[in-house]
Amino acid sequence: MDIRSEIVDQFTQVAQEQGIPLAPLTDDLALLDSGLDSLCFAIVVTRLEGLLEVDPFSSSEDVRFPVTFGEFVRFYDNAAN
């Protein structure tokens, strides 16, 4: 399973479901500039937990939250390995 593809799919699907335009998902895109709001991110994270069977936000007490899309992908990639 390609984690990046799953994340892109979920960002795209949630944006479409919520009727929100999604910015191009490049590694340097700030998550705040993606077009998704906090509800959308909650939906994405919940779906990714089910699909990838990992929740990187609860795997450590010393979590540094991702700021860019590339950091978000690496965050999940590191948690899955």
Image (spheres, rainbow, N blue to C red):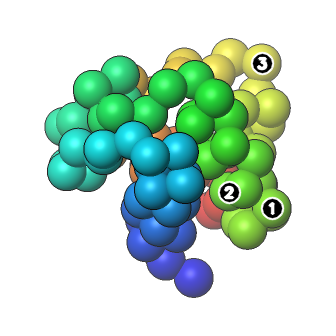
Image coordinates of residue 63 in percent, x first then y, are 64, 21
How many marks the image carries: the answer is 3
Image coordinates of residue 80 in percent, x first then y, are 66, 60
Looking at this view, is 31 or 13 the one in front?
A: 13
Residue 56 in view: yes
Question: In what element is the residue under mark 1?
Answer: helix
Question: In what element is the residue under mark 3?
Answer: loop
Q: How far, Cα to Cα, is label 3 from label 2?
A: 20 Å
Please name the residue shown 26% across and 51% down the image: 25
Are the residues at dot 2 and dot 1 in contact (C-beta closer than 8 Å)? yes
User: From the viewer's perspective, is 39 left or right of 46?
Assistant: left
Q: Which residue is mark 3?
A: 61
Q: Quadrant of residue 8?
A: bottom left
Image coordinates of residue 36 in percent, x first then y, are 44, 34
Which quadrant does the N terminus fall into?
A: bottom right
Please name the residue shown 30% across and 44% down the image: 21
Looking at this view, is 57 or 32 the one in front?
A: 32
Q: Which mark is residue 48?
A: 2
